[in-house]
Amino acid sequence: MNFRYIFKLFFSLILIQSLVMGVAQAESELPRFLKAITSQEIFPGADELGKPIGDPPVAPAYKKGKQVGFVFLTSDYVNTTGYSGKPIHQLVAVDMQGLIKKVLLVEHHEPIVLIGIPEKRITAVLKDYIGLDVGKLVSGEQKHQVDAVSGATVTIMVMDDNILRSAIKVARNYGLAGLEAKRKQSGPVASVNEDINVIKNWKELVSEGSVQKLKISLGQINKAFKDSGSQLAIDNPEEGKDDETFIELYAAIASIPSIGRSLLGENEYQNLKKKLKPGEQAIVLAGDGRYSFKGSGYVRGGIFDRFQVIQGDISVRFHDQYHKRLRKIAAEGAPELKDVDLFRTPADLKFNAANPWTLQLLVGRDTGPTSKVFLTFDLNYTVPDAYLTFTDAKAKSSEISTDTGLSQKAEPIWKRMWELKVVEIVILGISLAVLTMIFFFQDWLVKRPVLQDRVRIGFLIFTLFVLGWYFNAQLSVVNILAMFSALVSGFDWNYFLMEPLTFILWGSVAAALLFWGRGPYCGWLCPFGALQELINRVAKIFSIKQITVPWAIHERLWTFKYLIFLFLFGFSLYSLDWAERLAEVEPFKTAIILKFIREWPYVIFALAVLIPGIFIERFYCRYLCPLGAALAIPGRMRMFAWLKRYKECGTPCQRCSNECMVQSIHPEGHINVNECLYCLHCQVVYSDDHACPVVIQKRLKRERQDARAAASNRKEESAIKVVLNKK
């Protein structure tokens, strides 16, 4: 196979795609989505959609020439980033009275929804927004409770928040439902008084309102679900005494100097000040009781799914990169609480520490294997006037233009991501350094077979449990497809820097390809590969018979992974979204990222590719892995050949070929770098004078020479003894 032609083909396809798509996308995606639908699909009763107008844009909807409402894209108005780190695009139609007519989910990259939750369950939730009155929602006359889908709670909550907040902004911008655009405050404007630095104890903080409290007992939570009318929720009450604490939740603004110093202590407060970027604020949340406000969403996907902070039209749902766990509250007399956590608000949301806000707590109750009922409880927070200064609105408006939170550009989020993952980055860096040392000093290591085997097993265990299941640092062919897509649609380093571990791994892969080919990643750093090899090792311990695939069949089967990769690559040029769905041929998300907690078809598929690995070592790596195929192609450019061979290898000796775990050594003796996983077993054999026939012959020859020399010495000694005896 001539890989030069493959490279030319790849870059030709990229060039053609760039000519078709253009190198930059429009600032708003609204026109693109409107072209793909009819007016009836998004706005029932409308017969025409006008061209987008305004900034952010909306598309007027008409019926017989008369405007009946607007259609807009949520991501034009609010931050719609979900689990995937990419926007969740939803089209919303609202009429001139401020009633929502329809909501469509038009594009997303959420892994839970894409590959774990049926699409119809999501569209069923969106039907609940039809008829929602935006004006009554703002005034509090109408309540809205999202029907969260079990397994995708965070994604649904983010989508709900996007719809409501963007609809309110559109209604304000165009005077719908009696709402008016927010005007500058005419009365006194509050701001934080940075000069007040009084340290207070816990009792004083609570009594003055610097710390606000929400307490719910078991009796109260059971009554609330009873009042909700859900019989299934009523039939599954919290067991225990009515006066037992369900949750006791405290909240405070920690970026206000006096409150922050009192709650955090001086050292922690100074650390916070260094961490806070212009425009960011900090909130302390502390809780106790049976129910935790933190939930488990932040463990799985980095989002705290049980609460959000609301201030006017702003809503803040916190990600783990804005979170820090604290040991305790430093204020004198503070109770010992189970959870004490510090959260920072993103600068782009412009959360104002001086203004009132509400913490909305979400409490769910299981009503079936895949269904839940949710209730929300509010904790309202207002900063005590003692920590604020009030100025005339006109004077304040002139100050706003020079306020550092608005005038200075916030530090890119990728930098904060790297700061927050320093420990993981250091551990990954050390592991890469260790692996590099293994390869650079492989000649020394392979002469010690027992040590080499233990080092390899230890590294594979680290790769699976730490890099894979703990850090979720599993590369995917989707990363490669996204890179090619970025090259034709506007490349941005910020996107690729958002996940530091993935970025570092790809950097190490690029370097390794020049030295060793694809082997270092596929053979040592891939968590799914490590899982396969460890399973096979266990199978061998239990003496499960291994299958050797005949060479003629084996060398034809390995082409499948290249065909799969080329298919996915070609499909990505047409639709990256569909290519990502088809990339589920990789079971990495199921087995490594989601740890088999998925819908049963995906779990069955993952097991289906793992089970053959019990009998055929690294079965998936050999024949199906598109990522391995993608790495093998540029791996042909490697500059060094560090795996040593003898001229006798292959003719006649076949030992290494027979023992290679992925059959990457051809019968004629040469190593196929496209298939080699650089396990170093062949180098162990190469150096072993009791395993490699070539070295065995050298050893035997040396031993014969030593034996002859010893025999000669013995004869000389005997002769000398005879002479001495005669004397």
Image (cartoon, helix red, strand yellow):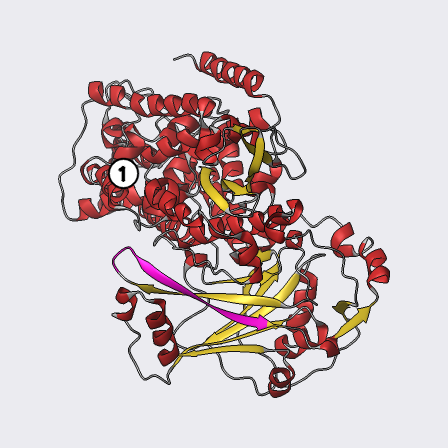
Crowdedness of circle 1 by 10 Å Cα count: few (<14), some, many (20+)? few
Residue 410, position as x, y percentages in the image: 70, 50
Quarter of the picture containing the N terminus is: top left
Of 515 and 412, the residue lying toward us: 412
Q: Is residue 578 above or below residue 130?
A: above
Q: Nearer the viewer, residue 693 or 145?
A: 145
Which secondary structure lies at badge 1? helix
Residue pointed to by mark 1: 710
At a point 53% along the width and 72% down the height, the residue shown is: 379
Q: Is residue 315 visible?
A: yes
User: Start and end of the magenta stretch?
Assistant: 368-380
Picture quadrant where residue 370 is located: bottom left
Q: Nearer the viewer, residue 172 or 603?
A: 172
Q: Position of residue 348 (x, y in %)?
A: 66, 51
> Which amino acid does the dot numbered 1 rest on?
Ala
Residue that appears at 36% across and 80% down: 219
Name the residue: 78% across, 55% down.
404
356 to the left or right of 144: right
- Residue visible at 67% across and 76% down? 259
**Magenta segment includes 371:** yes
Whether residue 530 is visible to the viewer of this picture, yes or no, is: no
